Image (tube, rainbow, N blue to C red):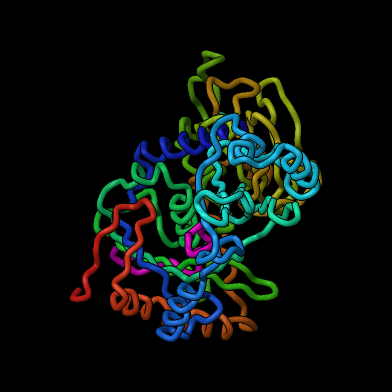
């Protein structure tokens, strides 16, 4: 149920994006270059990689030259007992296996559409074991030969640095519908360049490059890790480079200025403004003119609402008009209030410190509201203001104590970004992660 809900939210988010908020064009993805652990090993590493693939003659720990493997997916309502029964495994053994599985991975936990593999001595031989894969990271061995035992194994995750580049041509979000990971990467790019680039006004011909981590299990990509650097060219060049030290963490431009502004522009991603701040507007429910001391962001029910800046929860409550609401005090000058929430986020209560971007609640329509939205209000020295017209103080650049370290890090990242282009062309390998991808020739 939870997964289904999440998917619906995702579809809503994409639909919101399709409304025309952002146009992102062709992205070209190249194949893996270097494992993270040995970023400088280049060709020798490639050789290692090929070698390890040839030497990998075991599947789930069974020698592929000695055993026979039958891979299939669990059918709806199918249980391990019935699979094994039809393979001729006696009921007493199945019963013993089920009992032993309880503490490791209960046979009753198997789910339809997941992979399983029967390991046999040969195509018509007895079942040596059944291997079930609940997720790409894990496999469970139900061993029947010699002794009956159940063993859960976690596969090692390898992280590689990846490079992607692209050009804005048209909306590409249709092709991303199926691919959660791609959305997370675009999300991260926006994050890394949020104060440098206005993605609401992405233009045809804009170019970008991304350097990021991608996690693999058994040479199959499973998730996107950290975005290490983002580059965007919309007539002028912008960089967001990830940097972490004892006291500082985040994205910085070439000079060491943080990518994040002190205040986010909106408390929800992928929303649209349904009503602006005004001293006089016609109220849709009260049917009379009334000042609107806030900005309404329409978004799907359940969309996360984020704190727009660091601060402390000053109020959490319910009002007949406001519905569920939260007020955050950011500093001596500014407070923000978020109305009509469907529910509050876990752990949010008066006095709790929140960070910029932290989820404090979820979009709803509690109180006087015609549809799901968050009414976002900001006060400066106690007076309501239009946050979209406010010039906020810019965040401090990295101090002298760490700037030298940052420059060193920055230069190695830039080198990596440039070398990536050369290497990828050499290997001529292309991976399409759900984006429209074009073939890059060696000659280019
Ligand atoms: Zn409002």
Q: Ligand 1 shows up in which quadrant of the image?
A: top right
Q: Which residue is drawn at 34% across and 65% down?
A: 165
Residue 157: x and y, percent?
Answer: 58, 65
Q: Which residue is drawn at 54% across and 46% down?
A: 115
Residue 278: x and y, percent?
Answer: 50, 32
Q: Residue at x 69, y 40 (%)?
A: 90
From the viewer's perspective, tell me whether residue 274 is left or right of residue 129: left
> Is residue 18 placed above or below 406 in the rendered structure?
above
Tell me if residue 398 can be seen: yes
As drawn, which residue projects farthest toward the left?
Answer: 443
Q: Quadrant of the C terminus?
A: bottom left
Q: Which of 94 and 181 is in front in this view?
A: 94
Q: Which of 328 and 105 is in front in this view?
A: 105
Q: Which residue is drawn at 65% across and 49% down?
A: 358
Q: Which of 298 and 219 is in front in this view?
A: 219
> Is residue 241 placed above or below 173 in the rendered structure?
below
Residue 239: x and y, percent?
Answer: 43, 69
| Residue 19 on the magenta segment | no
Tell me if residue 348 can be seen: no
Q: Tell me the chief SS of the magenta region.
A: strand
First to last magenta residue range: 214-238
Q: Which of 205 and 318 is in front in this view?
A: 205
The quadrant holding residue 291 is top right
> Is residue 236 placed above or below 200 in the rendered structure?
below
Q: In which quarter of the image is the N terminus?
A: top right
Residue 373: x and y, percent?
Answer: 55, 30
From the viewer's perspective, tell me whether residue 178 is left or right of residue 123: left
The quadrant holding residue 384 is top right
How many marks the image carries: the answer is 0
From the viewer's perspective, tell me whether residue 332 is left or right of residue 297: right
| Residue 234 on the magenta segment | yes
């Amino acid at each position: 149920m939870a997964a289904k809900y999440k998917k619906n939210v995702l579809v809503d988010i994409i639909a919101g994006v399709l409304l025309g908020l952002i146009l992102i064009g062709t992205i070209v993805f190249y194949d893996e270059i270097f494992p993270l652990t040995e970023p400088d090993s280049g060709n020798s590493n490639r050789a290692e990689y090929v070698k390890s693939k040839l030497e990998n003659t075991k599947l789930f720990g069974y020698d592929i030259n000695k055993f026979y493997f039958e891979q299939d997916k669990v059918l709806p309502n199918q249980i391990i007992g019935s699979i094994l029964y039809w393979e001729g495994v006696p009921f007493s053994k199945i019963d013993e296996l089920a009992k032993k599985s309880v503490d490791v991975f209960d046979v009753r936990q198997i789910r339809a559409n997941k992979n399983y593999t029967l390991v046999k001595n040969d195509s018509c031989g007895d079942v040596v074991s059944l291997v079930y894969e609940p997720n790409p990271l894990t496999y469970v061995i139900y061993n029947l030969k010699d002794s009956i035992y159940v063993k859960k194994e976690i596969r090692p995750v390898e992280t590689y640095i990846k490079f992607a580049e692209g050009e804005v041509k048209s909306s590409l979000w249709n092709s991303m519908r199926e691919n959660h990971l791609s959305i997370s990467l675009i999300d991260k790019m926006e994050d890394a360049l949020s104060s440098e680039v206005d993605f609401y006004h992405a233009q045809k011909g804009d170019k970008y490059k991304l350097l990021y981590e991608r996690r693999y299990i058994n040479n199959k990509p499973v998730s996107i890790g950290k975005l290490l650097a983002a580059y965007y060219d919309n007539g002028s060049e912008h960089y967001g480079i990830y940097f972490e030290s004892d006291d500082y963490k985040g994205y910085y431009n070439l000079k060491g200025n943080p990518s994040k502004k002190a205040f986010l522009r909106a408390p929800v991603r992928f929303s649209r403004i349904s009503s602006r701040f005004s001293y006089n507007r016609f109220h849709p429910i009260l049917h009379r003119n009334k000042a609107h001391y806030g900005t309404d962001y329409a978004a799907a029910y359940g969309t996360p609402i984020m704190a727009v800046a660091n601060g402390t929860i000053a109020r959490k409550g319910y009002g007949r008009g406001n519905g569920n609401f939260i007020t955050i005090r950011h500093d001596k000058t500014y407070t923000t209030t978020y109305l009509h929430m469907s529910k509050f986020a876990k752990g949010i209560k008066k006095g709790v410190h929140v960070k910029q971007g932290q989820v404090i609640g979820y979009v709803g329509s509690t109180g006087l509201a015609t549809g799901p939205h968050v009414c976002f209000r900001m006060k400066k020295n106690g007076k309501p203001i239009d946050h979209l017209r406010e010039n906020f103080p810019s965040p401090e650049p990295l101090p002298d104590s760490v700037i030298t370290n940052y420059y060193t890090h920055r230069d190695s990242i830039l080198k990596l970004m440039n070398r990536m282009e050369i290497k990828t062309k050499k290997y001529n390998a292309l991976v399409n992660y759900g984006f429209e991808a074009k073939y890059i020739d060696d000659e280019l």
